[in-house]
Image: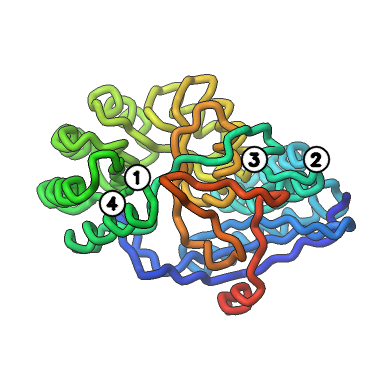
Amino acid sequence: MKITAVRLHPLCVPLPRPVRTAIHAIRTADTILVELETDAGAVGVGYCFAFGAHRARALQALVEDLAPLYRGQDPRSARGLFEAAWRAINFLGHAGPAVMALGALDTACWDLAAQAAGVPLWRYLGATRTRVPCYASSGLWLDAEVDTLVREAEAFVAAGHRAVKMRLGRAPAEDLERVRRVREALPPDVALLADANQGWDEITALRVGRALEPFQLFWLEEPLPYEDVAGYARLAAALDTPIAAGETEYGSLGMRRLLEARAVDVLMPDLQRLGGVTGFLKAAALAEAFHVPLASHLFPEVSAHVLAAAPTTLILEHMDWHAPLFEAPLRVVDGAALLPEAPGIGLRPDRAALGRYRAG
C-alpha cells in the first residue's frame, strides 16, 4: 500500500452556539480535514483545527509542507513517518501549529494501517475493551446562566451520560454557587467535573479549590496557566480534588515535565498537540510508567481508540464539535463511548457536510 495523494479540505464548522471559557470566545472550529488516498483504494482520514480562519490557514500551509514526506510512502510505517516529519519540523520547533499539522497526517496513516489489517484501530492497537467511559463536555459553558446549566446537565444525563463537565471562571462566590446548583441537580451517581480553563492564579486556585472540595468533583481541570508547572505541583499536593491538565502541552516532553514534577493527578493530552496517534501512544506509555490515570482532550472519534488500548485510561472527553463532518459519529450509551467495529478509525466524511462547511 502506498499513499498516492494528500487531499485537504479547509472547513469552517459552526458550533451549536457561541461559547465562552475563561480565556476564549469561540464561534467556529476552523478545521483542516486531511484525506490520504492510496493505490489500494483505501482512504485515511485525520484532522486538525484552530479557532480563527487565519490560524487554520497556517495549519493548512504546514500540512501541505509536510505532505511530500508522505506521498509514495506506506502508511503502515506510521511511526517511521512520524519520526521523519518530527525531524523535518525541528527548525520550527516541536510545539505549535507544525505539530498539529503533523497530527492530522499521522492520524490518517494509522487509520489506513488498521484498514489494511481489516480491523478497527482499537483492535489493531491490541485493546480488548469495546467501550470507554466518557463525560459530556459540549455544554455548561461559562456564559450560560445557572438555570441553563442545570437544564443542560439534566439533558446530558437523560441522553445517557454518567459524567458532566462545567466551566468555571466567574467571581469565586458565583462559581461556587453554580457548582452547588449543578451538583444538586445531578443524581448522586453522576460525576461532575469542573474546568477553569487556566483562568486563575495560584492563590485563587487554592482558595476556590478548597471551597469546592465538599462537592467532591471528579476533577478540577487546568486551574492555572499551563506554563506554571511548579504551581500545578503545589496545588496538586494541597488539594484532595484531583488536578487534571496536559491538553495545552506538546509532545512527550510536555507530558514528561508534568509527570516528573507530580503536577497532575490525571494526565489529559490533546491528540493534535501530541502529533497524532503516534504521539498519543507515547503519552499513554508515560502515563503507565508514572502510574497516572489517562484522559483525553477533544478528538473523541480518535482518542477513544487509543484510550481503549491504554493501561491507565480513566475517561474520554466527549465533545461533538466535529460530529457533523462524519457519517457515523461516536455513540454514547450508559456513560461510555461505543468503539466502532468498522476497519480503521471509522471517520467516513459526509460529502454533503464537506461542501456545506467548506471555508471560503
Q: Is mark 3 on a helix, strand or loop?
A: helix
Of marks 2 and 4, which one's residue comes earlier in the chain? 2
- What residue is shown with label 4? 167
Front position among marks 4 and 1: 1
Crowd class of label 3 (few under 14; some 14 to 19; many from 20; radius 10 Å): many
Q: Which mark is residue 163?
A: 1
**What type is the residue that disc 1 sits on?**
Ala
- What residue is shown with label 3? 122
**What type is the residue that disc 4 sits on?**
Arg
Q: What residue is drawn where x is 56% and y is 75%?
A: 357
Q: Nearer the viewer, residue 157 or 17?
A: 157
Crowd class of label 2 (few under 14; some 14 to 19; many from 20; radius 10 Å): few
Q: In this view, does 52 lie above or below 210?
A: below
Q: How far apart are marks 2 and 3 (CA)?
A: 17 Å
Front position among marks 3 and 4: 3
Label 2 with label 3: CB-CB less than 8 Å? no
